[in-house]
Image: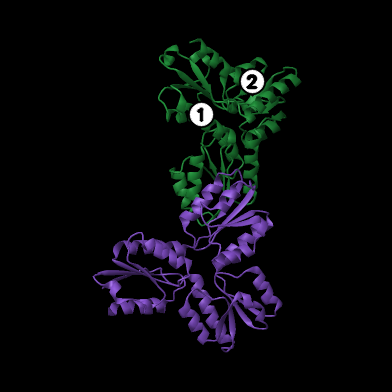
Chain colours: A green, B purple
Amino acid sequence: MEILIVKSGGFCFGVKRAVDKALEISQRYNNQKIYTIGHIIHNNDIVKKLKEKNIEPVDIKDINRIKDSVVILRSHGVEKHIIETLTENNNIIIDAICPFVKKIHNIVKKLVKEKYFIIIVGDNNHPEVKAIYSFTEPKSSLIISSPKSKELKEFLKMNKKKIGVVAQTTQDYKNFSSICNKLLKLKSEIRIFNTICDATSKRQKETLNVAKKVDIMIVIGGKHSANTTRLKELSLKHLDDVFHIENKNELQKEWFKNKKIAGITAGASTPQFVIDDVVQAIKMF
Amino acid sequence: MEILIVKSGGFCFGVKRAVDKALEISQRYNNQKIYTIGHIIHNNDIVKKLKEKNIEPVDIKDINRIKDSVVILRSHGVEKHIIETLTENNNIIIDAICPFVKKIHNIVKKLVKEKYFIIIVGDNNHPEVKAIYSFTEPKSSLIISSPKSKELKEFLKMNKKKIGVVAQTTQDYKNFSSICNKLLKLKSEIRIFNTICDATSKRQKETLNVAKKVDIMIVIGGKHSANTTRLKELSLKHLDDVFHIENKNELQKEWFKNKKIAGITAGASTPQFVIDDVVQAIKMF
């Protein structure tokens, strides 16, 4: 079985940085209990590994329980009110937010100050988007997921004079530019920040290229990870045999029957060792 | 012969305002010699009418001759260095620049102050664009006429961090949005001001609608007027018999042979009396 691996698959810069930071902090505090707000990344294997080091995720609803502790802010950001609660409760806050996400927070804060209406192009329920949104004024901001969304249609009638636009780092460029295009028709000032992360588009492009050349595609990443799901969707444009798994244990030998070339890609939260394990397992089939 | 007239054809708000202002000033100064920088609008009939009132256009190369006089700044704006020369030469300057064009000057001045690289979407040789350009820093601004232009290709490689975009008021929206789309791909801040004038798009839309329904289309306006030429191009999408004239004297009876419905549209600089004359003449055929 020939295997083609998407080189830009797996941990992006921000995720690698956050995990490294968590491990470094754990060591600095002699493996005492350390908390992360939600899962530090969307990957169960890494979450398990971190638990072994006494680094434990806390659900947002339980945030008030965390007092006088060390808390790590995850790579995709944390909502403003959570940071405030953590601060009030005398925690030591370690900021492991991806610098590219942090840049969006700073842009949004500046736009709020300068009285722009803010459009966040992204998925309503994604923690990165929720965190960005938390730095805006709710009456002067909107999350738009698609150029066809009702929210956008309603917004276009509102005739806002100054509009600032940012994007979730993992947004699809075409979706982003279609939404910007609709806004351009307004006789308003549209201040656009293309904050889509290169890592994502690079990974998506390379995934498409590999998908063209293979008989079967394995997409590795958390089942709830938006950027991994997107890799699956893109692969399906070129072939039907696309399987989304979290790790080698989900692989099924019969998928590979009569296949000659397998492609492997992985979402931003997939650690290298998980990818390596999958490659090894396929080689054994 | 049935005649369909494009209602939004002819003088736009800014042009009507400039001509009215010129006539008002002429009266205030008891018909003494008054100058306009170049032709106040692109219409020979109006220029002739103004000459009768002692309102005379001055070529830019002769600008130094004008001293201690009353000078009217035309609707589509005047280059910065010309205003400076006029001021130095002790002239009384009457500003008849269209408020929508003036707004672009103000946007551009603000963007220069805030250190944006400025893109003017428009035609290099149009006086409105030349005037806008004169308020920018030459090393930090560019006039882009088409999404396929060499200048745009070169610019995209320059990797500027803060880019401001304005449009010539008479720009075609599709051309403007195509250029903005190319810019959006950059990882930069793109601050877009859609300064295209509604009068233009309304006139273009209505012209297309009328062109669909007629056998012959008469487009009235200065032969050098970009917005009139655009009306001709749009009409040609729906029929072949499209004639661009400046006034009724250019009409030819044989054009209307075997035609049942004639459409009439007119550029932003065409006065109402010229349109009325053409309609009357066609009715007589």
Give the amino acid type for the residue marked by disc 2 in the picture: Glu
Query: Is residue A211 rendered to the left or right of residue B238?
Result: right
A176 or B168, nearer to the observer:
B168
* Viewer-nearest of discs 1 and 2: 1
Marks 1 and 2 on same chain:
yes
Task: Say which chain tag 2 marks.
Answer: A
Find disc 2 in the rendering and name its residue.
Answer: A56
A4 shown above or below B253: above
A96 shown above or below A216: below
Q: Which residue is drawn at 67% across and 16% down?
A: A53
Mark number, residue A13? none
Q: Residue at x 64, y 51 (%)?
A: A114
| Residue B155 % position (x, y) | 60, 50
Query: Is residue A153 rendered to the left or right of residue A166?
Result: left
Task: Say which chain tag 1 marks.
Answer: A
Does residue A144 appear in this view?
no
Mark 2 packing: few (<14 Cα in 10 Å), some, or many (20+)? many
| Residue B227 % position (x, y) | 46, 66
| Residue B127 % position (x, y) | 56, 68
Give the amino acid type for the residue marked by disc 1 in the picture: Thr
B162 shown above or below B8: above
Q: Distance between the residues labelled 1 and 2?
A: 33 Å
| Residue A70 % position (x, y) | 71, 25
Number of marks drawn: 2
Q: Earlier in the sequence, mark 1 or mark 2?
A: 2
Question: At numbered mark 2, what does the secondary structure look like: helix, strand or loop?
Answer: strand
Query: Is residue A71 rendered to the left or right of residue B52?
Result: right
Find disc 1 in the rendering and name its residue.
Answer: A207
Mark 1 packing: few (<14 Cα in 10 Å), some, or many (20+)? many
Does residue A146 appear in this view?
yes
A243 shown above or below B253: above
Question: At numbered mark 1, what does the secondary structure look like: helix, strand or loop?
Answer: helix
